Image: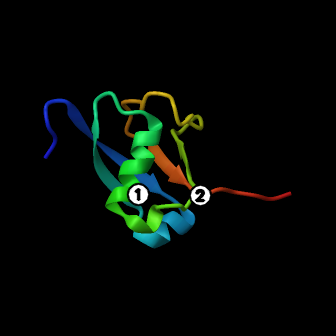
Amino acid sequence: MTSPSSRRVRVRLYASLAEAVGPVLELDVPDDARVRDLARLAAAAHPELAGAGFGVATADRWLAADEPLPDRDDLALLPPVSGG
């Protein structure tokens, strides 16, 4: 249950992150949460994500760790990618 100063966010996971914990997480975050708080809370709820190294994105951009967590329903955790 959320408290008056928190909100529930739904986050989609992809690739190895989804394989580890499933395709969707729902987390309670403080209203003033930053992106890094989402990463910390996700790892606390699912220890298999700790140290996984992932980015947080919306449908249209990557989010920086120190920016406020947007109030959107299209948040995603994505593992690092590489290629050439």
In the image, 68 versus 8, the foreground residue is 68
Tell me residue 31's x, y (percent): 28, 29
Q: Please tell me which residue is depicted at 59% across the width and 35% down the height of the picture.
A: 61
Q: Please tell me which residue is depicted at 32% across the width and 59% down the height of the picture.
A: 45
Say few, some or many: other residues with alpha carbon within 10 Å of mark 1 (under 14 / 14 to 19 / 20 or more): some
Q: Amino acid at mark 1?
A: Ala
Q: Is residue 22 visible?
A: no
Q: Which residue is mark 1?
A: 43
**Disc ID at residue 79:** 2
Q: Amino acid at mark 2?
A: Pro
Q: Secondary structure at mark 1?
A: helix
Tell me residue 63's x, y (percent): 55, 35
In the figure, residue 75 lies in which quadrant? Answer: top left
Front: mark 2 or 1: 1
Mark 2 or 1, nearer chain start: 1
Q: Is residue 52 above or below residue 20?
A: above
Alpha carbon of mark 2 to alpha carbon of mark 1: how far?
13 Å
Say few, some or many: other residues with alpha carbon within 10 Å of mark 2 (under 14 / 14 to 19 / 20 or more): some
Q: Please tell me which residue is depicted at 51% across the width and 31% down the height of the picture.
A: 66
Q: Is residue 36 visible?
A: yes
Label pair 2/1, CB-CB below 8 angstroms: no
**Disc ID at residue 21:** none
